[in-house]
Amino acid sequence: MLLQVENTKDGYVVSGWFNEESGYCRWRPLMNFGQAQGDALWACHSHLPKMDELALKRMADRYNKNIQYHISGLAAVRVFEHVKR
């Protein structure tokens, strides 16, 4: 599984490279970390590679750009909902 951190207008987003049922591959967003670049890099290189591809696909299906994740400790991920005003 390939993972990357993208700097988007919504924040630092970790995305995964998925094989689609159509036979094509594409990047799909997994987690939005807002302006927490270090948290996004930690998730990309340490947390998400430990998950299996099915769990990552489910995470991509549930992706919501308004939910931001932040690392709390070395293994816990806390969720904060970002409300645009």
Image: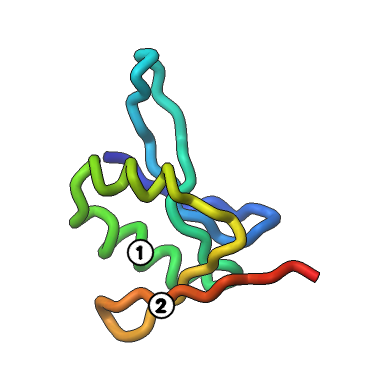
Residue 38: x and y in percent read 45, 72
Residue 57: x and y in percent read 33, 41
Q: Residues within 10 Å of mark 1 (few under 14, many from 20)?
A: many
Q: Quadrant of residue 46?
A: bottom left
- The residue where tag 1 is placed is 43
Camera-nearest residue between 72 and 54: 54
In the rendered structure, the answer to whether residue 80 lies left or right of residue 9 reads left
Name the residue located 48 percent from the left edge and 46 percent from the top edge: 29
Camera-nearest residue between 56 and 40: 56
Secondary element at tag 1: helix
In the rendered structure, the answer to whether residue 47 lies left or right of residue 18 reads left
Name the residue located 45 percent from the left edge and 75 percent from the top edge: 70
Report the disc number at residue 24.
Answer: none
Name the residue located 57 percent from the left edge and 71 percent from the top edge: 81
In the rendered structure, the answer to whether residue 32 lies left or right of residue 78 reads right
The answer to whether 77 is drawn above or below residue 66 in the figure is below
Residue type marked 1: Ala
Q: Residues within 10 Å of mark 2 (few under 14, many from 20)?
A: few
Secondary element at tag 2: strand
The answer to whether 19 is drawn above or below residue 70 in the figure is above
Q: Quadrant of residue 45?
A: bottom left
The answer to whether 48 is drawn above or below residue 19 in the figure is below
- The residue where tag 2 is placed is 78
Quadrant in which the N terminus is drawn:
top left
Residue type marked 2: Arg
Give the foreground label among 2 and 1: 2
Q: Which circle's residue, 2 or 1, is located before the other in the chain?
A: 1
Residue 20: x and y in percent read 37, 23
